[in-house]
Amino acid sequence: MKVTFYGIGYVGLVQATVFADAGHDVCCVDIDETRIENLKKGIIPIYEPGLTPLVEKNFAEGRLTFTTDAQFGVEFGELQFIAVGTPPDEDGSADLKYVLKVAETIATYMQKPKVIIDKSTVPVGTADKVKATIQSTLNERKSDLTFSVVSNPEFLKEGAAVNDCKRPDRIIIGTDSADAEEQMRELYAPFNRNHEKIIVMDIKSAELTKYAANCMLATKISFMNEMANIAERVGADIEHVRHGIGSDPRIGYQFIYPGCGYGGSCFPKDVQALVRTTDGIGYESKILKAVEAVNYAQKHKLFEYITNHYGLEKNPDAIKGKTFALWGLSFKPNTDDMREAPSRVLMEQLWKAGAKVQAYDPEAMEETQRIYGARNDLNFMGTKESALNNADALIICTEWQNFKAPDFSLMKSLLTTPVIFDGRNLFEPRRLKNKGFSYYSIGRNIL
């Protein structure tokens, strides 16, 4: 099939590339000329395992094309995917201006019937707005062309997005058109061979499904962080609690790891957007507001440990001039994404208190540099060990695999004082205590 994607960011680029790899002809349209030219040269704007060779292969074989020419994109694809960003507006609601601009563009140039697919994460009712925008533009053209609008939300995990596209858990198709459903089934046929993964529903249900999924996962994380905070105060070990409840198949082990808060491009934005949606329909979503509040507080958890350890409440200058090694900048492993990353909240608190940061991350240092620029109180180090050199303590914000089994003797010799603030519970507290470390972890400080 011939498919066009508008918006070659995280979702658009990965899904477009996987479609091309399955044999479809895919045209990628973006207004960022530099991004398009770089993609043609094999320079990928994001870090995602397995993506670069897949882009290079399908571009070289002619199934994947990149352009800034929107008219060419409209003419190219029978299926038109809208995958542009929906950043939070000032009140936290999803900003649909980019989505609706693409809809207007499609309607301006289309010369035959099209199926327009919302791939962006959008609030319930967006398909109606897309339909209205397209119809209004066609009316201005005095055109009687027909079209269908489909909701086809993405469920990609950063760090595993290529595999999620190749082997999706489910394929949600929201449509009221039998013809559009048939075309979508044909498009996804290569990914639906082992067993039936396609779930067809009405458009508004499909739109809500995306938000409901992310908000459920965010709720599990905030719930476990709440339990971890309780465990600290009653003298329990949250790791034992996690094993105890995770063994219940109704609960399971996924997304019940306590930590220093969730980040990324999806959970924070989607929780906020659904809260604003419910406010707009006169319903107060108390659970989602609590999820958001717990996560906000949890991002301050590591600095709370630092405050208590160094006595900052009594002496605000207690860490002024101190240097902290920081392992992990990205909001999660296997990505360079810094959006809403807990490390950002922590670093900004440390800087405000007069401390310096020596940071190491396998992928996100360049993105961190782009965000913060050159600073005297932020140094990027070439290895996790070099980040420890003459640092007063180690802080862990991201659970990269190569952080999980370090040389503790070497760590102790490099740090000026053997102190670790662990936001991802990578180590066993008793083991660290026996090695002479002061070790702070989430919900496990019972020694």
Image (cartoon, helix red, strand yellow):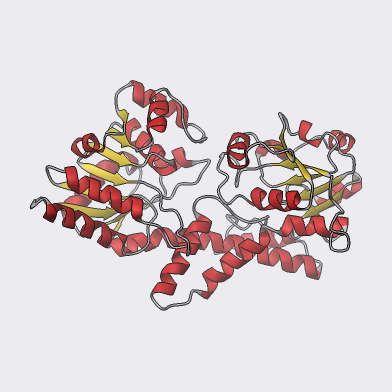
Residue 134 in the image, given as x and y percentages of width and height: 20, 54
Residue 306 in the image, given as x and y percentages of width and height: 81, 55
Q: Quadrant of the N terminus?
A: top left
Callout count: 0
Does residue 206 lie above or below 404 as drawn? Answer: below
Q: Quadrant of residue 289?
A: bottom right
Does residue 204 lie above or below 58 as drawn? Answer: below
**153 or 76, which lies in front?**
76
Q: Quadrant of residue 172?
A: bottom left
Give the residue at x 63% y 36%. 365
The answer to whether residue 50 shows anywhere in this view is yes
The answer to whether residue 245 shows anywhere in this view is no
Q: Locate residue 87 relative to residue 146 in the image: left or right.
A: right
Q: Quadrant of the C terminus?
A: bottom right
**153 or 257, which lies in front?**
153
Q: Locate residue 260 relative to residue 355 in the image: left or right.
A: left
**393 or 320, which lies in front?**
320
Give the residue at x 12% y 42%. 111
Q: Locate residue 363 relative to residue 102 in the image: left or right.
A: right
Give the residue at x 17% y 53%. 137
Q: Locate residue 49 relative to residue 242 in the image: left or right.
A: left
Residue 382 in the image, given as x and y percentages of width and height: 71, 29
**144 or 61, which lies in front?**
144
Residue 188 in the image, given as x and y percentages of width and height: 30, 43
